Every structure is written in structure tokens, then in C-alpha cells.
Amino acid sequence: MTVDQRPADTPEVAAEPPETGIPRQIKLVLGVLLVAAFVMILNETVMGVALPRLMDEFGLSAATVQWLTTGFMLTMAVVIPMTGLILQRFTTRAVFIASIGLFTAGTLLAAAAPVFAVLVIARVVQASGTALMIPLLMTTVMTYVPADRRGRTIGLITIVMAVAPAIGPTFSGFILAHFEWRFMFIAVLPIAVLGLILGALLIKNLAEPRAVKFDPLSALLSAVAFGGLIYGLSSIGESAGGGHPPVPPYAAIAAGVVALGLFVLRQLRLQRTDSALMDLRAFQSRSFTVGIIMLLVSMASLFGSLIILPMYLQGVLHLTTLETGLIVLPGGLAMGLTGPIVGRLYDRFGPRPLVIPGAIGLAGALGLLTLLDQSSEIWFVVVAHVLLSLGLSTLMTPLMTSSLGALRPELYSHGSAILSTLQQVAGAAGTAVFITLMTTGQAAAIADGATETAAQAQGIHEAFIWGTGMALVAVAASFLVKKPDDAAPVVAAAH
């Protein structure tokens, strides 16, 4: 047998190809996008701790002041589904400047807001900019970063998505302990302005936009569908806790489901002529569909835990807001710091060797959280939360990379929009499920004669039991994940 006839599995032929470098222009763009995304996600998570202070400041009820977070989520739900079309019709530079410009304007308006209504408007403006940033970042990575370096690059995005929410409560707790609430926005404003200036100077047009038809009916159906679902799911927890949302939660969910069905039918028709607002042909990829399902379960578990765990720390263990922020900080830092490592491992071994232990770790950590009670030690909470965060870190980077990497390049922007939109829905669903289960369990315990603190601990216990069950679904699905068969070509940047 000659040298040319060696089997494909011999060392000479099986040697790994040399890694492809990332062009300097793309590195600059990604650096600016990462900084901007970090600031925006940090801003998204600081408001929860500040709501009691704002209730006193403006003399409002909890149901009213909650619109600062509900309005933000609803705006994200309306804007994100349109990002697939926006990213095709406009240049990277134009979308970035619009995104950071809206965020900066909203931050300035929030810092100067004289009345509550203006503060709500400011949050809506901020959310409009934030909704554009993550899909822009993901699409830029998938389009311009070589396939053999996507894992570690998306690992950097994991740092942003993990560390910013972890720092958010600690940051806002520190600000509120020493300054008035306006400084939450004042502190962020210089960074936003700097990001706007750097983006205007450094970001060039990476590719030429193309003409894509805009369908107003699709935009309307999308707004009602995803807005209704997220509002309804978010309101379930408020309703279960004795609140009275302006629109009944299940009516909003029903409207959202009907609109979603009409939206899907509309997209199936429009995508025949490549004019869909959200091209659903992405779901023809098995890897994309399986990855999305796992990401939805993971995000629901994450958001549900993020809202339940502080309630446990403050309501059952009676810790302060700042102490709560410090306890959840190590988990967020661990998740962020392991992102690049997980990304490098993905580039070398593919998703399955990471996703399977990650899903098992997620289920195991949620199982540990079911053991929390009135006498639990702080160190146990920290360890369980760190394990939860490490499990999520091992899941998120491989799932995002393999899911989007399985698509054709022309579907990257739509895949990013689908991923970001459904993450919002999953977060709202996870929050609704965990809050409802906690409230129901708490009410049952009180009916049985338990004290308020013991009843809340019982409700949280039941919520984490169901969360563990959700995570076991991710464990089963993890065995179906595989690396995309063929790496899609990288698009050259325009000059």
C-alpha cells in the first residue's frame, strides 16, 4: 500500500489542521461589542434590588413599581424577534450605534427622571438598545469567526452573560447602601458614552446589507405573541402572591398563544420568498432544535433559581440585600471564568463530552438546593450555587455554539433572534413556575399551621424539587446533542 493509500485514521492524515486566526478588525469589533453587552446586561439586573427603595421614593405599590422590570422584558420581547431582519437590512456599525445610542439615551433619561412615568419610559428606551446587542454579538461571531475558534469566542460571551447578572445585585446593593438610586444609572452612563465613542471610531461596516422586505403584520403578531406570553407568565407569580395585574395572566397567555400560531403560519408562508421576519427553517436542523430545547430548560432553571434563592436568603435566613448579592457572586464569577475554558474544550472535543456532565451537574445542584431549610449553613448555599453555575457554564457555551453552527450562514441572524427570543420566554416561564410552586407550597404549609418563615422554606423546597425534575429533562436530551457535521464558511469582512 502506497503512502497515498493510507487509511484515513492514520496519524499523518488524522492530524488536526492548524487553527485559523481572527482578523484584527473582527477582534476590535468583538471587544467593543462585549464591553457594551456587559454594561447592558449589568443594567438589566440591577433594578430588582432597587424596587423597595423606589416604592418609597415615588409612593407606589409593588404592583406598579414592578413595571420597571415588566416593561423592560416586554420591550425586549417585542424588539428581539425583529433583529433577524434588522441585522440583514443594516450594517454592523449602524446597528451597534443604534443599540448603544438608545441605551445611553435611556440611561441618561433614567438618571434624570423627575417622575415614575419618565423612569418607565427610560427603561423601555434602554431595553430597545439592549435587545439589539446580544443578537448582533452572536451573529457577528457566527459570521466572521472561524469555526475552530467559535467555542472559545462564545465562551467570552458566557462571561458577559454570567458575570454581569452576578455582579448586578451586589453593585446595586452597594450603590443603594451609600447613594441615592439615581447613581445606579449615573455610574453606568460614562461607560455607555465611552462605548458609543469607541464604536463610532473603531467599528467599520463588516458586510454590505441587503434589501429584505418588512412585513408589518408579522411584526404586530410577533409583538402580541411574545409580549403576551412573557407578560402573562411574569404576571402569574404576582397573581399567585396576591397581586392583581392589570390584565389577567391567563388571558394574556391565551392571546399570546393564538398570536403565536398565526405568526408561525405567516412565517412559513413568507419564508418561501425569503421575506420572513423570523425564518423558521432554522428548526429543520436537528442540532439546532435539540440545542434550543436544552437551552430553554437550562434558562428556565437559571431564572427560576435566581429569583427563588434571594427570597430564601432574605426571607428564611433573614440576610440583607448586600449579603445576598455577595453570596450569589461566587457562582456567577465561577460561571464566567470557566466560559473560555469550556469554549476551548468545545473547539477540541465537540459539545457532547461537555453537555452531558453539565446537565448532570445542573440536576445535581438543584437537587442539593432542595435540602435548604431554616438551619442551612451559608457555605452550603454558596457551594450549591457554585455547582449550579458550573453546570450551566458547561451547558451554555457548547449549546449556543453547536446550535447556531448547525445553520446555514444566511440563517445565522434568524437563529440568533430565535435563540434570544426564546431565552426571554424561558426566563419568564421559569420564574412563573418557580414562584407559583413556592407560593402554593407556602400557602399549604401555612394552612397546616406552619410559621411564615417555615412555610416559605417549604414552598422554596417544593419549587426546587420541580426544578430538579426540569433539569432531568435536560439530562435526557443531552445524549442527543452532537457537533455540526460541516463547518459553515466564514464570511469575509467588507472593507
Image (cartoon, grey):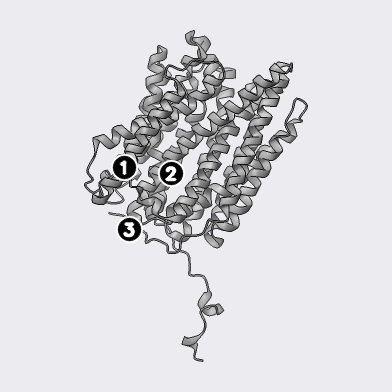
Residue type highlighted by circle 1: Leu
Which residue is drawn at the image coordinates 40% and 51% (left, top)?
283
Sequence-wise, the earlier of marks 3 and 2 is 2
Q: Mark 2 points at which residue?
A: 419
Camera-side mark, 3 or 1: 1
In the rendered view, would you say 32 is above or below 342? above
Residue designated by label 3: 492
The image shows residue 182 at horizontal and vertical percentages of 47, 18
At label 2, counting other C-alpha atoms closer than 10 Å, the crowd grade (few under 14, some 14-19, many 20 or more) is many
Dot 3 falls on a residue whose secondary structure is loop
Q: What element carries label 1?
A: helix
Between residues 184 and 342, which one lies in front from this camera angle? 342
**Kind of residue at badge 3:** Ala
Q: Considering the image in quadrants, where does the C terminus appear?
A: bottom left
Badge 3 vs badge 2, beta-carbon distance below 8 Å: no
Residue furthest bottom in the image: 1
- Name the spot of residue 279 as percent of width and height, x first: 33, 47
Q: Which residue is drawn at 39% across and 31% down?
A: 256
Residue 156's label in the rendered image is none
Q: Which is in the foreground here, disc 3 or disc 2?
A: 2
Looking at this view, is 62 or 189 the one in front?
62
Q: How far apart are marks 3 and 2 (CA)?
A: 24 Å
Taking 238 as reference, is 492 above or below it? below
Q: What residue type is labelled 2?
A: Leu
Q: What separation in Å lies between label 3 and label 1 (alpha carbons)?
A: 34 Å
Q: Mark 1 points at which residue?
A: 265
Say which element carries label 2. helix
Mark 2 or mark 1: whose residue is earlier in sequence: 1
For residue 94, which quarter of the picture? top left
Q: In this view, does 353 lie to the left or right of 150?
A: right
